[in-house]
Image: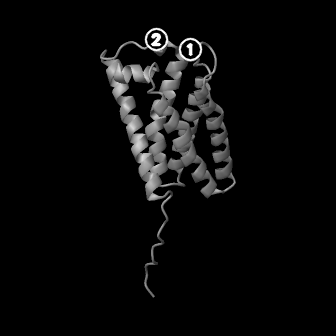
Amino acid sequence: MSATAPTAVRPTDVSPLLRGAMVASGSALSLLSLLALVRAATGMAPTAPAAHDVAVAIHLMSVLPAIPLGLYILLTRKGGGRHRLLGRIWMALMASTALSALLIRELNHGSFSWIHIFVPVTLAAAWASIAAARAGDIPSHRRRLVGMFLGAMIIPGLFAFSPGRVMAIWAFG
């Protein structure tokens, strides 16, 4: 009998197509965000009126690091202490992003807009994914977090580059 046991092949967390979609969308959003921040920081971008709002600042400080962090967590090894620590940080960033969005209403004359639907979606997905992990239902935990990354971060993140929004003004002038 051999001294080394055969290595079990660990299935990938997500399909190659979904992994590619996450990498492409997360990378595109990260690069667009970096472009916007560099243009704003160097004075190359016009001033966005809402950029001085505290809620917008908190929102941006929460969501911008959450984009690459979420992608990293979804694509690297799972289950260890590092995964749990980074997952907690990501969840805190996502909750802060969602809650600060409730205070951002100047684009809709003080009212909520359609994009605010992502606030309860994000908070519910966070709650459900944590509950699934605590219950040991890792496949459900994984599905919910992939859905949360794409549906509560990437989709609204791309809408952040719509005309009139801070990131669009900074990125495209």
Looking at the rendered structure, which numbered label has been put on residue 49? 2
Q: Residue at 55% of width from left, 18% of height from top? A: 55
Q: Residue at x 55, y 41 (%)?
A: 151
Q: Nearer the viewer, residue 74 or 45?
A: 45
| Tag 1: amino acid | Glu
Spatial CA distance of label 1 from label 2 is: 10 Å
Q: Which mark is residue 22?
A: none
Q: x%, y% of residue 124?
A: 67, 39
Residue beneath label 1, please?
106
Q: Please say whether residue 76 is visible from this viewpoint.
A: no
Name of the residue lying farthest toward the bottom: 1
- Corner quadrant of residue 112: top right
Q: Horizontal and vertical percent for residue 115?
A: 58, 28
Return the x and y of residue 110 as percentages of the image width and height. Answer: 62, 13
- The three-letter code of the residue at mark 2 reads Pro
The quadrant the N terminus occupies is bottom left
Q: Which residue is painted at 37% across and 25% down in the image?
A: 36
**Residue at image location 36% in from the left, 13% down from the top:** 46
**Quadrant placement of the C terminus:** top left
Foreground residue, 13 or 81?
A: 13
Residue 71 x %, y %:
45, 44
Q: Residues within 10 Å of mark 2 (few under 14, many from 20)?
A: few
